[in-house]
Image (cartoon, helix red, strand yellow):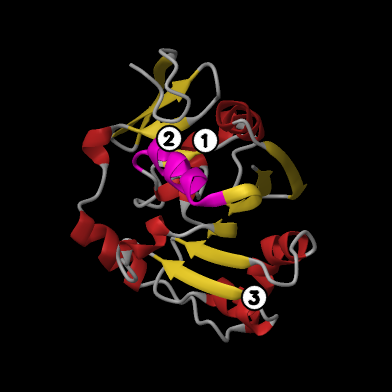
Amino acid sequence: MNCLLCTEPSVKLFLEVDDKIYWKCGHCLFIFLDFKFRLSSLEEKSRYQEHNNDIHNPDYRLFLSKLFEPLRAKLGARSRGLDFGCGPGPALAEMFKEEGYQMDIYDPFFFKDDVIFSKKYDFITCTEAIEHFFEPAKELKRLDSILVKEGFLGLMTTFLTDEKDFGQWYYRKDPTHVAFYQPKTFEAIASMMDWSYEIPTRDVVIFKK
């Protein structure tokens, strides 16, 4: 089996737990849920509608600031951004708008406007979304295609830091989470996409094209 992220033919069975099967790539250390255990689109959307991501919630804004602050420090005053996979409450886009940045939003369930794929962006944010990607390689290439040269892609997801605890890990138990990334996985992504990258704080990675 080829890896869904780096496409290398180095995938092996990683773990069977809670009547589910997980696979791991030996090259990039990406771990993913077997296809047959994925939720349907309707089931996914129903779960996302349960999230309480109010754009005015100060605790949620503080959570998003882990990406907002280090990314904003890299941006020019007229930078144009996209919040990709923003969910029903695009709080991060609102935070950037409040600082004077032009922002578009996109979400396959709540704000599906494919016009974004005909535009170019100076920066793209993707918070708590890449763990839901069924086809991460395809999605990263789509984002690369709309990111300007020397533009930034900021991702936030909970990193897997100890494989031994994967079976009991709370993040794995969310039925919408199908893709799991270790710090080394982001090194492989940078190499694959010919980007540079940094990890400014826990669970945040910023790529530069």
- x 31%, y 66%: residue: 112
Q: Secondary structure at mark 2?
A: helix
Q: Quadrant of the C terminus?
A: top right
Query: Where residue 123 sits in the image (x, y, percent)?
Result: 61, 58
| Secondary structure mostly seen in the magenta stretch | helix
Q: Nearer the viewer, mark 3 or mark 1?
A: 3
Q: Amino acid at mark 2?
A: Ala
Q: Earlier in the sequence, mark 2 or mark 1?
A: 2
Question: Which residue is denoted by mark 3 in the rendering?
Answer: 101
Q: Is residue 157 visible?
A: no
Reading the chain from its start, which is encountered first: label 2 or label 3?
3
According to the image, label 1 marks what residue? 166
| Mark 2 burial class by Cα count in 10 Å: few <14, some 14-19, many 20+ | some
- Tag 3's secondary structure? loop
Q: CA distance from mark 3 to mark 1?
A: 39 Å
Where's residue 3, x and y in %? Answer: 41, 23
Image location (x, y in percent) of residue 11 = 41, 17
User: Over which residues does the magenta segment extend?
Assistant: 134-147
Q: Are marks 3 and 1 in contact (CB under 8 Å)?
A: no
Disc 3 marks a residue whose amino acid type is Tyr
Q: In the image, which is nearer the foreground, mark 2 or mark 1?
A: 2
- Up the image or down, 206 lies above or below 7; here it is below
Measured as percent of width and height from the top left, residue 119 is found at: 45, 60
* Between 54 and 142, the one nearer to me in the picture: 142
User: Taking 67 as reference, is 21 above or below it?
Assistant: above
* Residue carrying label 2: 137
Would residue 184 appear left or right of 107 to someone viewing this image?
right
The residue tagged with tag 1: helix, strand or loop?
helix
